[in-house]
Image: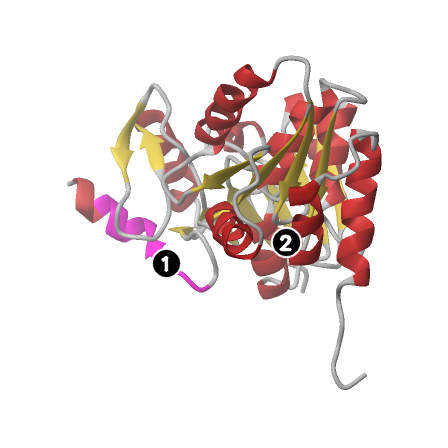
Amino acid sequence: MKRVVVMGHGGYAQGIKSNLEMIVGLPPHMYFIDLTKEDDLSDLKRKVDQLLQDFSGDDVLFACDLLGASPFRVAAEICAHHPGKYYTVAGLNTMAFLELSIVEDRTLSIEALANRAVESTKTAVARFPE
Amino acid sequence: MAKTYVRVDDRLIHGQTIVAWCPTLSIKEIIAIDDESAKNPVLKSIMTMGVPPMYKTHIVTTEEAKILLAQECNFNRLVIVKVPSKLEAIQAEIEQADLIILGNIAKRDDTSHKISGATGIFYLSDADVSLIEGFISRGTEVCFQQLPATTKMSWESFKKSIK
């Protein structure tokens, strides 16, 4: 099974959750963790470790708000210990989250899913008028 | 003239450093000192991924930092350590620093002071306080400040609060 863990600062994850809930309904394979003002890095790590305990053997994609920031670092460090099974992406937009919420193609590897999310984000950024 | 700023922040290099502190202080070079991260290429690459290439970034051991800090430099530098106690090891090298900014410093076993006059998380031990007092007595300015836009608290106000 493939799981997606959304992580960010100050309500980001809850915001993405509400956003998806309204558009497509709550996807059962997606999880949402926020770093609050009161949390330090070890609190965040604890929250993530607790969640991962239930994921034995599953592939995981972490989707973090900001490249290089604390949630990203926590996720990336975990990925380094699970090569090929865990990936981290950062800065996704709604279009990419919507695609991740569907995961219609069960044959898609977790790496391909990560790549697709990054590409979808890039193609869904636009300006009007052009 | 080139300035050296020192930041104590247990997250070392992170988003707030890059998007807020570096532009505010016109930083060109970042020297992050952490022996564990410096010796681990994975941690190092994770940490530098979020740093734009316009900043010259070093994640180094204490010994490597001493060599870097001894070199003449004509642009502003930001030295980052995770905990106040690390300042002792680089005391001579940062003696000329313009400002020591205490940032995010989480609670540890020996921390008996919780600072509440500024926005953010700041915990200091008695040993941290006396170490920083040493910098103050040698003329270095020290303050508590999480972000350039949040409340800054001087070391003096903190000292008054614990008397």
Q: Chain of mark 1?
A: B
Left or right: A9, with B18 as reference point: left
Q: Which residue is mark 2?
A: B18
Residue at left offset 63%, top offset 28%: B34
Residue B39 visible in the snapshot: no
**Label drawn at residue B21:** none
Q: Residue at x 44, y 64 (%)?
A: B149
> Which chain letter matches label 2?
B
Q: Which residue is mark 1?
A: B152
Query: Extreme left residue here?
Result: B163
**Residue A110: where, in percent of width, then height?**
78, 30
Q: Amino acid at mark 2?
A: Ile
Question: Does dot 1 land on a helix, a strand or a loop?
Answer: loop
* Residue nearest the viewer, comparing A28 with B151: A28
Q: Is residue B151 above or below residue A128?
A: above
Q: Is residue A87 magenta?
A: no
Front of the two marks 2 and 1? 2
Give the image location of residue A109, x and y in percent: 82, 29
Q: Identify the residue shown where x is 74% and y is 39%.
A: A104
Disc 1: CA contacts within 10 A as few (<14), some (14-19) or many (>=20):
some
Q: Which residues are magenta?
A: B149-159
